Image (cartoon, helix red, strand yellow):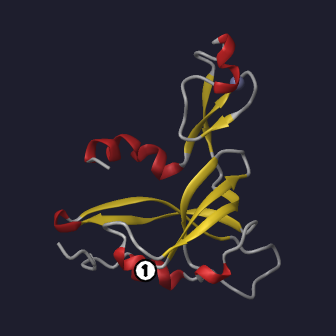
């Protein structure tokens, strides 16, 4: 991903800002300027409203990645999932703070703001959303693993042999 593309996408990556069609109420992320569901009539032009996704959802499908893409070497194995948000849009993201073997379809998750990757020698660090398991109400047996995020954010660990 180029730097320009990264910065253009940053506002959405930061806050999960999508858009909602004021005609049919369909929600989109990333935001769209025209509603595909209403596109036949082109009547949705100018009727898309900003909409804030809650970040709550559940795992729709996932895969455990053992061979990392460049820049992700330090994180393997990791879980890449498609999350169905409660508002409807599907988001692709990493599931963190859980053992890959414990991830399952239907797992309740919430978005969290994390470092995504570093770009080699340049040291450009990309941030964006990931997902963490959401504790069921009344289930206080397993508090979220806060230590993991701190370790992950430690600077100087590039893991890139460039
Ligand atoms: Zn629509």
At numbered mark 1, what does the secondary structure look like: helix, strand or loop? helix
Question: Residue most toward the right?
Answer: 138
79 horizontally vs 104: left or right: left
The residue at 67%/62% (across/down) is 61
The residue at 43%/44% (across/down) is 11
Number of callouts: 1
In this view, the residue in front, 127 or 69, is: 69
86 horizontally vs 145: left or right: right
Residue 63 location in percent, x, y?
58, 68
Give the residue at mark 1. Answer: 150
Ligand 1 quadrant assignment: top right
The residue at 28%/79% (across/down) is 157
In this view, the residue in front, 90 or 7, is: 90
Question: From what the image shows, is residue 15 above or below residue 162?
Answer: above
Question: Residue most toward the bottom?
Answer: 141
Residue 155 location in percent, x, y?
28, 76
């Amino acid at each position: 991903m180029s730097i320009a593309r990264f910065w253009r996408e940053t506002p959405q990556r930061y806050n999960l800002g999508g858009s909602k069609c004021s005609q049919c109420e369909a929600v989109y992320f990333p935001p769209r300027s025209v509603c595909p569901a209403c596109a036949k009539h082109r009547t949705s032009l100018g009727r898309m409203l900003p909409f804030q996704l809650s970040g709550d959802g559940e795992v729709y499908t996932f895969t455990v990645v053992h061979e990392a893409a460049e820049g992700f070497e330090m994180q393997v194995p990791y879980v890449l999932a498609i999350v169905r948000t409660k508002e409807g849009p599907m988001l692709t993201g990493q599931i963190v703070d859980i053992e890959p073997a414990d991830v399952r379809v239907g797992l309740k998750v919430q978005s969290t703001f994390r470092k995504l990757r570093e770009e080699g020698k340049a040291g450009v660090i990309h941030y964006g959303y990931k997902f963490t398991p959401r504790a069921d109400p009344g289930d206080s047996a397993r508090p979220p693993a806060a230590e993991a995020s701190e370790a992950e954010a430690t600077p100087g660990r590039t893991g890139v042999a460039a």
